Image (spheres, rainbow, N blue to C red):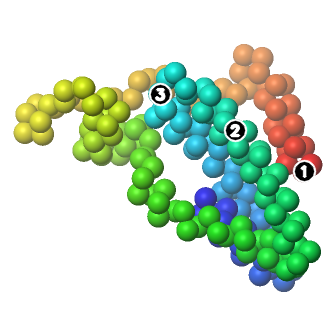
Amino acid sequence: MLLFSAFTAAAGFARDPITFSVLRFIAGLGIGGVLPLCVAHLTEYAPAGVRARLVTIAAVGYSVGGDISALLGKALLGSYGWQAVFFAAGAPIVLIPFILRFVPELLQFLLKKKRDAEVRRIVGKLAPGLQLQAQEQEQEQFVVPHEDEAAPIGRLFEGGRAFSTLMDSAVQQEQEIA
């Protein structure tokens, strides 16, 4: 979110096409990570009964947000010039302190970083009835299941998936251009 907002806003200051392109590329890296992280958080923390619905709403919201921003951009463009469209995209930066404060890290990340106290706090909120051992006593050990470990990118192309992986990527690029 920081990459997207900061570098999109900075694009409003660009004075040449190359600088503008570099800033937009970096901003694209930022926005490219927003939906996967949102889906990861929803998958990990949403109740199982509504998880799929919430992920779908997030994906639809991502697209609807793009449409709304285009309409707002069109309104700003006519009144304030093209730079205002990019400056306005910097506004979400103000949300970052709230996100850092209220959105927990993914449990898998915390486990890999050995941040056991945070894992215990989050698990305590997710399962209040679960009795965890006190810190002074021998504690339970939290582990990442093997199937949750990151797979190498080459697995996207195994088992006859090469064509569908490439086609999905091409469709996504086409939608971004449109």
The image shows residue 88, relative to residue 123, as above or below, that is: below
Of the numbered discs 1 and 2, the one sitting upstream in the chain is 2
Mark 1 to mark 2 CA distance (whole Å): 18 Å
Direction left: furthest residue: 136
- Tell me if I can see residue 141 in this picture: yes
**Which x, y percent locates residue 124?**
27, 35
Badge 2: residue crowd in 10 Å (few <14, some 14–19, many ≥20): some
Badge 1: residue crowd in 10 Å (few <14, some 14–19, many ≥20): few
**Pointer 1: what residue?**
177
Mark 1 to mark 3 CA distance (whole Å): 35 Å
From the viewer's perspective, is 82 left or right of 56?
right
Q: Residue at x 74, y 51 (%)?
A: 65
Q: Residue at x 85, y 59 (%)?
A: 71
Of the numbered discs 1 and 3, the one sitting upstream in the chain is 3
* Location of residue 68 by image quarter: bottom right
From the viewer's perspective, is 58 left or right of 86?
left
**Pointer 3: what residue?**
47
> On residue 59, which mark appears?
2
**Which x, y percent locates residue 53?**
62, 28
Circle 2 SS class: helix
The image shows residue 66, relative to residue 120, as above or below, that is: below
Quarter of the image with the N terminus in it: bottom right
Of the numbered discs 2 and 3, the one sitting upstream in the chain is 3
Nearest the viewer among 43 and 27 is: 43
- Tell me if I can see residue 18 in this picture: no
Q: Tell me which amino acid carries mark 2.
A: Ala
Circle 1 SS class: helix
